[in-house]
Amino acid sequence: MAEGAESIRRRTGGRSARIREQVFGAVLQELVAHGLSGLTLPAIAQRAGVHPTTLYRRWPDPEALALDAIRDRSMTQVAIPDTGTLAGDLTRFLTDLDAYVRSPLGRALLALQLTARGEADRIRQAFWRERFELSAAMIERAKSRGEIPATTAARPLLEFAIAPVYLHAAVLGDGLDQHSIALFVRRTIALAQAG
Amino acid sequence: MAEGAESIRRRTGGRSARIREQVFGAVLQELVAHGLSGLTLPAIAQRAGVHPTTLYRRWPDPEALALDAIRDRSMTQVAIPDTGTLAGDLTRFLTDLDAYVRSPLGRALLALQLTARGEADRIRQAFWRERFELSAAMIERAKSRGEIPATTAARPLLEFAIAPVYLHAAVLGDGLDQHSIALFVRRTIALAQAG
């Protein structure tokens, strides 16, 4: 009986996860095609092949759904690594970030937020606040390992680490090899160690 | 007679400069509205209120005109300062850059180049190559004044200086005050002095 119930939960979870994935894929496509102001729950439902009620039940409005989708995709494409060293974590993180910012979706989302106003700007701020809070785990673990001073503020250090990746991937559009990534990682750790 | 000729030259120069300004304004509006692939010389001429022949005479194609317009606007909005010190130059430069990247035109051009392919990408590369060459004057003057080692490579140092400005103005969309600019300037000079 217990086994049967668990099996049902697992199937339900699998189906639920699949629907989420379909819906997130659809909302990102709609977002890139029409922008945030052109986003509607019925259009997303149609593209995802689900009933609109499925969306209304979980998300109060298209903006909440968009934020959820962007957050989900970012966490999948640029996960917060835990390799055992700050250098290892930052190398993985900046490498993934570089690939994501260069990807068609990453570029389209950045382009959108550049011309975003009002509600779109509120979503952007919410996204970044959460993103920096989650990424701070890399810095906190480095502190607890004694790699960098316990007084290091996580967000300014993370900003310092990601700035050159965005410059090259999004602005200059030139290549960024492992040698450059390694240089950015060394500079970030040196900055933290200098206090 | 000489005075008369000079006066005519001045008027001619004035009219020519005014037409350039009208044409550049028109091409930037067209670029933001339709993208590089939607750019045509007749449409630009109409918006600028000049005869298409005026454009055909000076620019072989819309892409060359677009590059000229973006280059001109960048040099006007973010001039290469010569204040007498590297700290003074970088402070002025990063402050102007921050304002430009946040401006509607700056954001729109960045958004465009994020989704640019092919010819647009070639224009972007040409723009940045020239832009870094011109900006290197700040670094070269600092070397000749003995402020930083003569072996300092200009482009990587300039990239280091501008990266956080783009991160905040274009990606995070949060504020950047004079305190932050001063910090980026100090870090840039420290990096150069460390060799």
Image (cartoon, coloured by chain):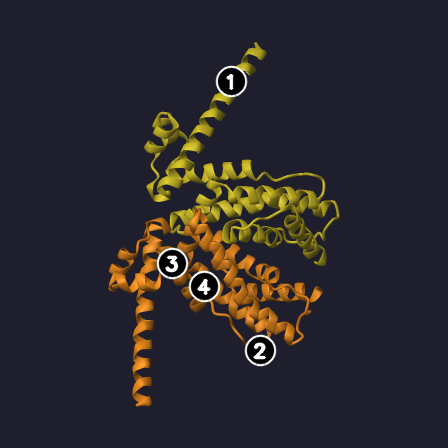
Chain colours: A orange, B yellow
Q: Which residue is mark 1?
A: B11
Of badges 3 and 1, nearer the viewer stands 3
Dot 2: within a 10 Å radius of its alpha carbon, few (fewer than 14), some, or many (20 or more) residues? few
Total numbered circles: 4
Task: Specify the subunit that label 3 lies on.
Answer: A
Which amino acid does the dot numbered 1 rest on?
Answer: Arg
Q: Which residue is mark 3?
A: A66
Which element is circle 2 on?
loop
Which element is circle 1 on?
helix
Q: Indicate the quadrant where residue B98 lies.
A: top right
Quarter in which the C terminus of chain A is drawn: bottom right
Pick whichever, A193 or B55, lies toward us: A193
Both labels 3 and 1 in a single chain:
no
Of badges 3 and 4, nearer the viewer stands 3
Q: Which mark is residue A99?
A: 4
Of badges 4 and 2, nearer the viewer stands 2
Which amino acid does the dot numbered 2 rest on?
Answer: Gly
The answer to whether B87 appears left or right of B37 in the picture is: right
Both labels 4 and 2 in a single chain:
yes
Task: Specify the subunit that label 4 lies on.
Answer: A
Quarter in which the N terminus of chain A is drawn: bottom left
The answer to whether B27 appears left or right of A86 in the picture is: left
Q: Which residue is mark 2?
A: A84
